[in-house]
């Protein structure tokens, strides 16, 4: 059970890192370089929709990540 939670945490952590790096922030200097310029590749409206989807997915995964960490702490702690 601990191994399964550990693998889930690892996969979610990697996804969170990638999702955050792919988002274009208000300051486009660094994040635009890392993400590859979503607005130029997808077009202006598609780039903003892509960022909105990434933002929502990041929020959901972060909440699930926190819940799994708490559950794993409860299992290992007992």
Image (cartoon, grey):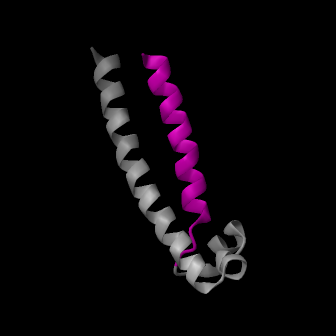
Picture residue at 51% right of the left edge, 41% below the top: 12
Range of magenta residues: 1-25
In the figure, 66 relative to 44: above or below?
A: above
Examine the image and state in which quarter residue 74 appears: top left
Q: Looking at the picture, does residue 23 appear above or below residue 76?
A: below
Q: How many numbered tags mark residues here? A: 0
State which quarter of the image contains the N terminus: top left
Q: Residue at x 52, y 74 (%)?
A: 49
Q: Quadrant of the C terminus?
A: top left
Q: Nearer the viewer, residue 8 or 31?
A: 8
Q: Position of residue 64 (x, y in %)?
A: 37, 43
Classified by dominant secondary structure, the portion drawn in magenta counts as: helix
Residue 73 colored in magenta in the image: no
Q: Is 9 left or right of 30, judged from the image as shown?
A: left
In x, y percent, where is residue 44?
61, 85
Q: Position of residue 51 (x, y in %)?
A: 53, 71
Q: Residue furthest bottom?
A: 44
Q: Could you tell me which residue is drawn at 44 percent across and 26 percent down?
A: 5
Image quadrant in which you'd find residue 47: bottom right
- Magenta residue check for 13: yes
In the rendered view, tell whether residue 31 sits above or below residue 19: below
Image spot of residue 58 (x, y percent): 46, 56
């Amino acid at each position: 059970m601990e191994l399964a939670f550990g693998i889930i945490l690892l996969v979610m952590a990697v996804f969170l890192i990638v999702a955050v790096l792919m988002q274009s922030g208000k300051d486009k200097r660094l994040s635009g370089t890392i993400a590859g310029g979503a607005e130029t590749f997808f077009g202006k409206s598609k780039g903003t929709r892509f960022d909105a989807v990434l933002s929502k997915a990041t929020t959901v995964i972060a909440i699930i990540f926190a819940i799994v960490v708490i559950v794993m702490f409860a299992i290992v702690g007992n």
